[in-house]
Amino acid sequence: MADSFPVVVVTGASGLVGSAVCRALVERSAPVRAGVRRPGSAPALDGVTKHVGDFADESLARAVTQGADAVVTTVHPMDSSRAVQHRVGVEGTPVVARAARDAGVARLVHVSTAGVYDRSAGVGDVAEKAPLLPEGSGDHADTRNATDTALARVGGLTTVLVRPPAIPGPGDTSVWNTLRPRETRGGERGVNPAKTWAWAHVDDLAALVADVATGAVATADDPERGPVAGGTTPVIVAGEPATWRDYLGTVTDALGVAPEWTDEPVWTGQLLTNRARGWGWAPRVSLAGAMDELRQGLMTRS
């Protein structure tokens, strides 16, 4: 990777995570090639050039990755059918990875999800080596796990699987600040308040992704100190401990509706972030700050 100003390709650059990653990279003076599916949807930032099309198209993937130092993939249509999730994630993302490898790109950073881990009732704290959910656990978990496995099979790259849980942050496409609250307003308010609400603010997630992509986090023989060169290294990203009482309580209070607390068995463990912290990362957005941002956004739109 170049000593300064590495060129980074970002797929899904118009999304909540992709656009935040673009901003974080620009803050680090990295030229960004922003991949989007629609003209005019790329972040309007100095240092960002847009590339419109489907990155599952091998010719586009090869053209955009030529001369790049790193690739960040953020695309996974989680609310789509299983067939679409499979086509985009399991089949499409490895196309970008193979193009990056063939172009001599040093690093691939894939935004995966902590949802691949078993977090059922009775399971304790979860670190990177914790058991993954088995096949048949649902369309999203199955296709996410399959995508991660497919990327691990693409040799010749240093691949990092970044695994965040819920990702709060402002935006019209934000699941946790916009879409889930809309469902809550519509009546979906039942949950055990003690259930862990694992989360990572989009800005903190983007900061780690950008640091890994630009080489600020050096490779290491030990994954607890950095990505393993030439291997595939998962890393969990999460903020401070929180429960659904914190999240849903904030949403319902802002919307002026009542939560419907239940008492079924739930996961009460934590996502452990020792690895990410060993790489020099630490969250800057507090739970109080994230909930205040959520509340203010909901009250403004009400």
Image (cartoon, rainbow, N blue to C red):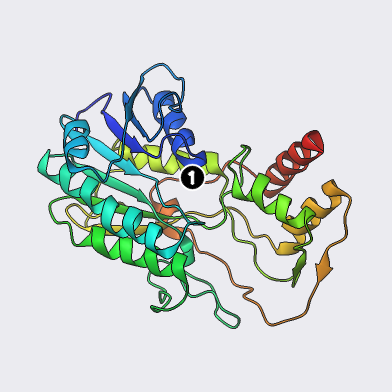
Left or right of 38? Residue 189 is: right
Front residue of 187/264: it is 187
Give the percent coordinates (x, y) of residue 171. Answer: 61, 37
Identify the residue at horizontal 32%, vertical 61% (top origin).
147
Vertical order, 28 against 133 (above or below)? above
Location of the N terminus (image quadrant): top left
The image position of residue 266, as x and y in percent, is 65, 77
* Helix, strand or loop under label 1: helix
Q: Nearer the viewer, residue 173 or 267?
A: 173
How many other residues sit within 10 Å of disc 1, few (<14), some (14-19) or many (≥20)?
many
Q: Residue 175's spot in the image, x, y percent?
A: 60, 49
Q: Kindly identify which residue carries mark 1.
A: 205
Q: Which residue is rendered at x = 68% and y = 82% of the image?
A: 265
The answer to whether residue 225 shows anywhere in this view is no
On screen, residue 2 versus residue 51, left or right, reads left
Q: Who's the residue at 89% across and 50% down the image?
A: 256
Residue 183 in sight from this viewpoint: yes
* Residue at the outermost top position: 46
- Quadrant housing residue 236: bottom left
Image coordinates for residue 273, horizontal then vertical, percent? 48, 58
Q: Is residue 44 above or below residue 289?
A: above
Q: Is residue 65 left or right of residue 15?
A: left
